[in-house]
C-alpha cells in the first residue's frame, strides 16, 4: 500500500514555517530572497507571504529594493508576534528581560533582595520585576525561562532548599508565580546548568579548539558551589534535577581530613559571617598573597576542588573541564587547580569559562530565543 500523501494544509503550514523561521533570523527579506534562503519556489513563497500577511504574522515593511530590475517589496514579522520573558534569580537580585524574536532585549527590570533570601521575598521581587517588564512592553510574554541560583526539582520546577544552600531559605515555584503573567510555558533550571549551556554554545565557534564542546563539566566556584555535566551536547539533570550539587562531595580538607567541600571553606575561615556562602573577597585576598597563609590556603582549596574534578571525570567522562565563578577564574586558583589535577591518574584539560559575567542569564536567553522562534515559526500548524 503506497504511503498516504501529506494534505494540502500540512504542506502549506510547512511552507509557512520555513518562511517564518527565515524572518526570525533576518529582519526583512523580499520574496525572491525568501525563495533563495528557503529553497522554495518563488510562486510557493508568494502564496505563503500572502497567507501570512492575511493572518497578521507578516507585514510589508514599506521598503523597496533599488537598482536595476524589478522592484521588490521587503517583508518582516509583525510587531505583535510576541516576546519571551527571561528571568535571573540570584543573590544579587532579580533581573527580568523581555527578548524579541530577533534576540534583542527590549525591556529590563531589576529588583533587589536580601541575603539569605526568604521564599516570600523572592516571590514578591519576581512578581514586581516581571510586571515591570510586561508593562514596559505593553503585552504579555508568550513564554518564560528562569535561571535560579538554587537547585531545581526536575519534575515540578520548584526551587529546592538543600542543607547549606547559601542563597534561598525555603522552597518556591517560579512557574506558579509567573503563571498569571505569561501566556505559555515557563521553563526553570539552575544557574550553573544555564551557564554550562551558554559555554557549550560559545564553543560552537569553529575558530575555537575545545576538545569537545559536546562533553564537558562546568564547575562554578563563587559564593555558592555547583557543577553542570554536558554529555553529547545535553545538560544532564538526573532523576530529581540535582546533578552537580557538589557542596557535599567528600574531599581532602586541611591536614588531609576528609570533609564535605563546603566545610573546607569554613575550616580555613573563608565563609561569610552567619552563612554557608563562600566569602569571595576574603578568599581572593588570601590567594593573591594578602594573607600570610596564602600558599597554604591556595593549596588546600586546589586539593579540595581537584577531589570534585576527579569525581566528575570518573562518573561523567568529560573531554574538558570549564571553571567559572567569581573566584574559580582567579589565576592563582585556576593555576593551582590545573597543576594539581594534572598529577591525577585520570585528568582532562581545564580552562576558564569564556563567559564570566551574566553567563547563566545568557544561557537562559539563548534557550528562550530558540523556544520563541519555534513558537512563531509553527504558529500556522494545523
Image (cartoon, helix red, strand yellow):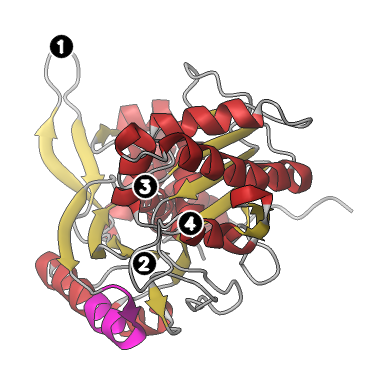
Which residue has dot 3 on it? Answer: 283
On screen, residue 341 above or below 175:
above
Quadrant housing residue 374: bottom left
User: What span is in magenta?
Assistant: 115-127
Identified at 55% across, 79% down, the residue is: 156
Other-residue count near label 3 (Cα within 10 Å), few / some / many at <14 / 14–19 / ≥20: many
Whether residues under marks 3 and 1 lie with C-beta atoms below 8 angstroms apart, the answer is: no
Q: CA distance from mark 2 to mark 4?
A: 36 Å
Give the numbered dot on residue 265: 4
Quarter-wise, where is residue 212 in the image? top right
Residue annotated with mark 2: 144
Q: How far, Cα to Cα, is label 3 from label 1?
A: 66 Å
At a point 67% along the width and 55% down the height, the residue shown is 257
Residue 203 appears in the rendering: no
The 10 Å Cα crowd at callout 1, few under 14, some 14 to 19, many 20 or more, is few
Residue 13 to residue 233: above or below: below
Q: Earlier in the sequence, mark 2 or mark 4?
A: 2
Q: Looking at the figure, which quarter contains the N terminus?
A: bottom right
Residue beneath label 1, please?
Answer: 68
Q: Position of residue 205 (x, y in %)?
A: 47, 24
Q: Are marks 2 and 3 in contact (CB under 8 Å)?
A: no
The numbered mark, 4 or 3, whose residue comes first in the sequence reads 4
Disc 4 crowd rating (10 Å Cα; few below 14, some 14-19, many 20+) is many
Looking at the picture, tell me which residue is in the foreground, 145 or 272: 272
| Foreground pick, 167 / 198 | 167
Circle 1 or circle 2, nearest the eye: 2
Q: Residue at x 46, y 49 (%)?
A: 221
CB within 8 Å, label 4 to label 3: yes
> Which type of secondary structure does the marked residue at label 1 adopt?
loop
Q: Position of residue 39 (x, y in %)?
A: 48, 29
Amino acid at each position: 500500500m503506497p504511503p498516504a500523501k501529506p494534505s494540502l494544509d500540512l504542506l502549506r503550514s510547512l511552507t509557512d514555517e520555513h518562511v517564518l523561521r527565515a524572518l526570525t533570523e533576518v529582519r526583512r527579506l523580499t520574496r525572491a530572497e525568501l525563495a533563495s534562503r528557503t529553497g522554495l519556489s518563488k510562486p510557493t513563497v508568494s502564496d505563503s507571504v500572502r497567507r501570512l500577511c492575511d493572518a497578521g504574522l507578516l507585514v510589508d515593511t514599506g521598503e523597496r529594493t533599488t537598482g536595476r530590475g524589478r522592484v521588490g517589496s521587503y517583508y518582516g514579522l509583525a510587531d505583535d508576534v510576541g516576546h519571551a520573558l527571561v528571568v535571573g534569580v540570584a543573590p544579587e537580585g532579580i533581573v527580568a528581560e523581555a527578548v524579541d524574536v530577533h534576540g534583542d532585549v527590549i525591556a529590563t527590570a531589576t529588583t533587589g533582595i536580601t541575603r539569605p533570601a526568604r521564599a516570600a521575598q523572592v516571590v514578591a521581587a519576581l512578581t514586581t520585576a516581571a510586571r515591570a517588564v510586561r508593562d514596559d512592553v505593553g503585552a504579555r510574554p508568550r513564554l518564560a525561562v528562569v535561571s535560579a541560583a538554587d537547585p531545581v526539582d526536575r519534575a515540578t520546577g520548584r526551587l529546592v532548599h538543600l542543607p547549606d544552600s547559601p542563597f534561598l531559605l525555603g522552597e518556591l515555584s517560579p512557574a506558579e508565580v509567573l503563571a498569571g503573567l505569561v501566556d505559555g510555558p515557563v521553563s526553570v533550571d539552575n544557574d550553573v546548568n544555564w551557564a554550562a549551556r551558554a559555554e557549550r554554545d560559545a564553543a560552537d565557534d569553529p575558530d575555537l579548539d575545545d576538545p569537545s564542546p559536546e562533553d564537558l563539566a562546568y564547575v562554578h566556584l563563587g559564593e555558592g558551589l555547583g557543577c553542570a555535566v554536558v554529555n553529547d551536547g545535553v545538560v544532564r539533570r538526573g532523576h530529581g534535577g540535582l546533578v552537580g550539587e557538589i557542596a557535599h562531595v567528600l574531599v581532602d580538607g586541611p591536614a588531609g581530613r576528609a570533609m564535605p567541600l563546603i566545610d573546607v571553606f569554613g575550616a580555613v575561615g573563608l565563609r561569610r559571617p552567619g552563612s554557608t556562602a563562600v566569602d569571595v573577597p576574603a578568599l581572593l585576598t588570601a590567594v593573591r598573597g594578602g594573607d600570610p597563609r596564602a600558599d597554604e590556603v591556595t593549596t588546600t582549596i586546589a586539593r579540595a576542588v581537584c577531589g570534585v574534578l576527579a569525581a566528575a571525570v570518573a562518573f561523567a567522562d568529560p573531554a574538558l573541564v570549564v571553571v567559572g565563578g567569581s573566584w574559580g577564574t582567579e589565576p592563582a586558583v585556576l593555576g593551582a587547580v590545573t597543576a594539581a589535577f594534572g598529577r591525577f591518574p585520570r585528568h582532562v584539560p581545564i580552562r576558564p569559562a569564556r563567559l564570566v559575567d551574566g553567563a547563566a542569564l545568557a544561557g537562559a536567553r539563548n534557550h528562550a530565543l530558540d523556544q520563541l522562534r519555534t513558537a512563531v515559526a509553527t504558529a500556522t500548524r494545523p
